[in-house]
Amino acid sequence: MENVSQQLEEIEVLKSIFNNDWKTDTETGIYSFQFKNDVKLFITLNPDYPSDAPPSYDLLAPNLSSNDKELIKKEFKRIYDEQQGNPIIFQWIEILKDIILSVEGKVSTDKIITEHPALDINKEEYNEKSFIINVVHGPTIVDRKSVFQGHACNVNNENDVKDCMHYLLQNKKIAQATHNILAYRILLPNLVILQDCDDDGETHAASRVLHLLQILKLTNVMVVVSRWYGGIHLGPDRFKHINNAARQVLTEGNFINS
């Protein structure tokens, strides 16, 4: 029953995110996502998904090479293995889109910082307002000179989000990051959930962090993932590091269990 409940919740989230690009064949029970005219992903939810097995899928993409399709297959497997039984269809769709855009030569360009930041943020720089805003900083992730670090704090309204973001940017190292990717979810007194995200130039990144908050069912929390670009394109790996940085800081701050 837990699998069925998670599947229903995930489908509702996917419909709200992708709108008309996400479709359901009521006769066969097969779901599909349309990306561009020549790329379509078909998903079949197995009874063991997500706890013990990934969903089944078919990819209609006649213009992709066999190597591209093999890369997609490996990335799908990696995502499922890393998520340890959590819903993964959103991550599959996003990595599929990223690989296709990469193949087409549309990988987003990043600005290169001239001075590499220190890996550990000096927490003393936050002491002035620490009694007002309790910000948690996660460990750093380094890959090919790019650095990723998550920051999280409790928020109860949009003003808290703005104040916390302003507070973080008082730190010069965070302010100099190539991207500060933001996502938050707030449970309002009327039980409506207020949520939003901001890519800060790293296309599709913030929606992945927001989806992480959704599948973890977290509220009254905001996450910012800082990325300092090191001059080497990471391709889809950058999204893996962004997701891991967000999850690590949420664990570090006891927002979720380790």
Image (cartoon, rainbow, N blue to C red):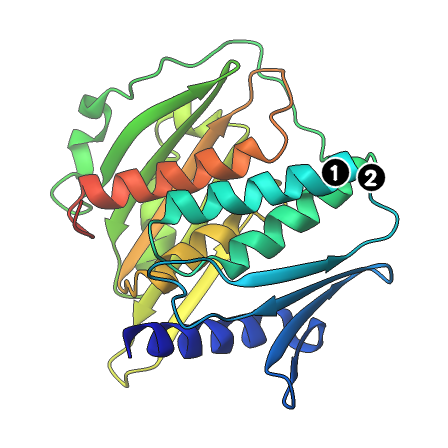
Screen quadrant of the N terminus: bottom left
Q: Residue at x 55, y 28 (%)?
A: 178
Q: Nearer the viewer, residue 158 or 17?
A: 17
Judging by the rendered image, the residue that carries numbered circle 1 is: 68
Name the residue at the top extreme: 115
- Asked if residue 130 shows in the view, the reply is yes
Report the Cα–Cα distance between label 2 and label 1: 5 Å
Q: Nearer the viewer, residue 183 or 53?
A: 53
Place of residue 143 in the rendered image (x, y in percent of width and height, measured from the top left): 48, 19
Circle 2 crowding by C-alpha within 10 Å: few under 14, some 14–19, many from 20: few
Residue 65's disc number: 2
Instruction: Specify whether 1 is left or right of 177.
Output: left
Please, what is the three-letter code of the amino acid marked with disc 2? Ser
Q: Find out whether the residues at labels 2 and 1 contact each other: C-beta distance under 8 Å.
A: yes
Badge 1 crowding class, 10 Å Cα cut-off, few under 14, some 14 to 19, many 20 or more, is: some
Q: Quadrant of residue 129?
A: top left
Please indicate, yes or no, whether residue 166 appears anywhere in the rendered image: no
Which amino acid, mark 1? Asp
Up-down relation of residue 190 to residue 124 (above or below): below
The C terminus: image quadrant: top left
Q: Position of residue 136 (x, y in %)?
A: 22, 39
Q: Secondary structure at mark 1?
A: helix
- Above or below 223: residue 37: below
Q: Nearer the viewer, residue 49 or 95?
A: 49
Q: Secondary structure at mark 2?
A: loop
Q: Residue at x 79, y 37 (%)?
A: 103
Q: Position of residue 191 (x, y in %)?
A: 28, 83
Q: Estimate the x, y position of residue 139 in percent, counting from the top left.
A: 28, 27
Q: Residue at x 82, y 34 (%)?
A: 105
